[in-house]
């Protein structure tokens, strides 16, 4: 019995031990489950906070994007609204400058020009700073020739330098390649800003520009530009904050040296954008040296020779423009002052055949009623802007298989992307306001071409009809021409009555019938006249087709005579 009792006691202890382990395991499991539950709750809380933060961040991002878009839109409008009247001021001042003025009047005109240019520079500085701040500034890489660049800068700035009693000279390292790769516009902008600053703070002294090759490899050259002056210099404490936006030295804030305090900040941003660095070495009263270093690509192929275009003076530029065989120009701008200025500029350039309209709708109507050689189109116009007007004109040219008229955008919005919008709409080129006589002349010379030869007949269609001849006495072409002659004059007279009376629907139907009949015989030019009248009638502008009526009979007769020659 003792052995059995011992075994039972042993078994009891084993069971107690196992029970204790089971209890401990359950307690541990419950503790783990409790901890897991707490962790899960914390995770859910974190997920909620994360979702809330994501929503807040998304809202903030959308708000920032919206604010950025609103800012860009606001800047574009401000740019256009400022530049349009400035175009009037500078344009009229330039025209006055070329007229007979007394010495006092010439001085007054120069004061107007200087004030307007200063305002234009302030606006440009604000726009550039805004674009740089938003990361919208893009480099336009291309060939850079330093010698012509400095010739251009000196030609622009030397009069002002001489006015301050200063001397300006340039020294360029002969080891620098004649042609490099970079952004010529931005390099010129930085150099002009630094030279203008040097001239502003220097009187009866000198400004020296040195260009040095710092280092080079197979693909690039590092170029250092230095602008040294003998002016008032800059205190050491001011040098530390000089490149910050809206910051000016104590002397720079005086009325004598007016400005926004953005110029050097913009220069620094542009130099960094070009992969370089900028700095200043100066002592108060001992002059200053502003410098910047940038990498520029080396050209591996020789540059092709460029034919000289001839820098004609404005006094004889009229002879270069609108010669016989050239079509008139259409000017579309809603601003009355700007229209008057451009009309006067064109007249100065020898262009007198110009029609002007004040809206995109009027531009489309004018296009339908007359053949133009060039359209100068303002972008921002009420109701229908220049972009929409251009799209409509391009669509109608395509429908009527007409030659595309060069359309040049005129706009005060010079923000990045605006030119791309113009080109996407179908415009050919872009000229920013305010523009000079020289830039307007060059733009028109670029796009003004002699009138394209008028295609009276589409000979491919005429040939196809001729090949349908049978063995009969009269050819099919001759028979169709007889029918056309019998019907067309009467229909043209009916069309004339519909147009004069303003019957849009009847005029559109009649013009369509005449267009189709003409096209079926290969009568090209006359059919385009009917098509233009049809389009005007369809858009409720049939009365604007009246100028075309006088061209119909001569065009009809010309087509009949051309077909007779083919038949013979």
Image (cartoon, rainbow, N blue to C red):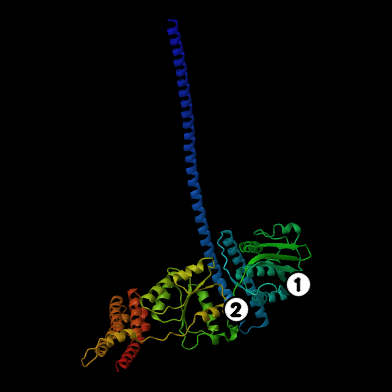
Is the N terminus in the top left, top right, bottom left or bottom right quadrant? top left
Q: Residue at x 65, y 66 (%)?
A: 217
Q: Are marks 1 and 2 in contact (CB under 8 Å)?
A: no
What is the count of numbered marks?
A: 2
Is residue 293 visible from the viewing direction of this image?
yes
Q: Which one is nearer the viewer's eye here, 195 or 274?
A: 274
Q: Which one is nearer the viewer's eye here, 464 or 281?
A: 464
**Where does the image place residue 177, in percent across and percent down from the top left?**
66, 73
Q: Is residue 223 left or right of residue 315?
A: right
Taking the view exactly as shown, the residue that stands out farthest to the front is 3
Q: Which one is nearer the viewer's eye here, 231 or 212?
A: 212
Taking the view exactly as shown, the residue that stands out farthest to the right is 286
Q: Residue at x 50, y 44 (%)?
A: 53
Taking 165 as reference, is 99 above or below it? below
Residue labelled with disc 2: 94
Residue labelled with disc 1: 206
Earlier residue among tags 1 and 2: 2
**Where does the image place residue 182, in percent across and percent down from the top left?**
61, 69
Taking the view exactly as shown, the residue that stands out farthest to the top is 1
- Mark 1–mark 2 distance (CA, rounded to whole Å): 30 Å
Q: Secondary structure at mark 1?
A: strand
Q: Is residue 168 left or right of residue 545?
A: right
């Amino acid at each position: 019995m003792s052995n059995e009792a011992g075994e039972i006691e042993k078994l009891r202890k084993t069971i107690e031990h196992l029970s204790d382990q089971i209890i401990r395991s359950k307690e541990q499991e419950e503790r783990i489950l409790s901890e897991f539950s707490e962790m899960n709750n914390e995770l859910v809380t974190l997920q909620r906070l994360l979702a809330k933060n994501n929503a807040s961040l998304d809202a903030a991002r959308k708000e920032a994007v919206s604010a950025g878009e609103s800012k860009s839109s606001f800047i574009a409008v401000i740019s256009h609204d400022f530049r349009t009247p400035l175009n009037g001021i500078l344009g009229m001042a330039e025209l006055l400058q070329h007229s007979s003025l007394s010495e006092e009047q010439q001085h007054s005109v120069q004061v107007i020009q200087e004030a307007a240019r200063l305002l234009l520079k302030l606006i440009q500085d604000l726009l550039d700073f805004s674009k740089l701040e938003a990361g919208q500034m893009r480099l336009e890489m291309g060939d850079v020739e330093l010698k012509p660049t400095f010739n251009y800068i000196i030609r622009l700035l030397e009069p002002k330098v001489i006015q301050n009693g200063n001397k300006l000279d340039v020294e360029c390292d002969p080891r620098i390649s004649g042609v490099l790769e970079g952004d010529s516009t931005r390099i010129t902008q930085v150099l002009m800003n630094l030279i203008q600053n040097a001239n502003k703070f220097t009187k009866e002294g000198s400004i020296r520009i040195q260009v040095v090759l710092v280092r080079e490899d197979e693909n690039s050259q590092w170029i250092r530009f230095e602008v040294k002056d003998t002016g008032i210099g800059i205190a050491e404490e001011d040098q530390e904050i000089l490149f910050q936006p809206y910051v000016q030295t104590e002397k720079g804030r005086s009325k004598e040296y007016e400005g926004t305090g953005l110029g050097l900040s913009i220069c620094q941003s542009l130099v960094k954008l070009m992969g370089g660095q900028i700095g200043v070495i100066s002592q108060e009263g001992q002059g200053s040296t502003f410098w910047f270093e940038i990498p520029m690509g080396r050209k591996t192929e020789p540059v092709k020779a460029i034919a000289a275009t001839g820098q004609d003076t404005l006094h004889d530029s009229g002879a270069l423009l609108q010669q016989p065989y050239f079509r008139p120009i259409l000017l579309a701008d809603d601003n009355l002052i700007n229209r008057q200025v451009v009309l006067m500029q064109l007249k100065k350039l020898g262009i007198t055949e110009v029609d002007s309209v004040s809206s995109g709708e009027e531009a489309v109507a004018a296009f339908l009623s007359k053949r133009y050689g060039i359209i100068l189109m303002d972008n921002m116009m009420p109701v229908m802007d220049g972009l929409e007007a251009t799209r409509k004109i391009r669509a109608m040219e395509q429908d009527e298989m007409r030659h595309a008229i060069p359309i040049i955008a005129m706009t005060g919005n010079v923000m990045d992307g605006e030119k791309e919008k113009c080109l996407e709409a179908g415009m050919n080129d872009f000229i920013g306001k305010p523009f000079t006589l020289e830039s307007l002349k060059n733009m028109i010379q670029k796009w003004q071409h002699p009138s394209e030869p008028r295609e009276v007949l589409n000979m491919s269609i005429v040939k196809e009809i001729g090949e349908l001849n049978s063995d009969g006495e009269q050819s099919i072409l001759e028979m169709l021409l007889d029918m056309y002659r019998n019907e067309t004059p009467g229909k043209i007279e009916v069309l004339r009555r519909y147009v004069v009376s303003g019957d849009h629907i009847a005029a559109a139907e009649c013009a369509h019938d005449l267009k189709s009949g003409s096209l079926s015989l290969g009568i090209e030019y006359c059919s385009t006249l009917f098509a233009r009248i049809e389009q005007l009638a369809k858009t409720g502008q049939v009365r604007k087709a009246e100028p075309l009526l006088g061209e119909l009979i001569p065009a009809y007769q010309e087509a009949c005579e051309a077909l007779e020659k083919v038949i013979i």
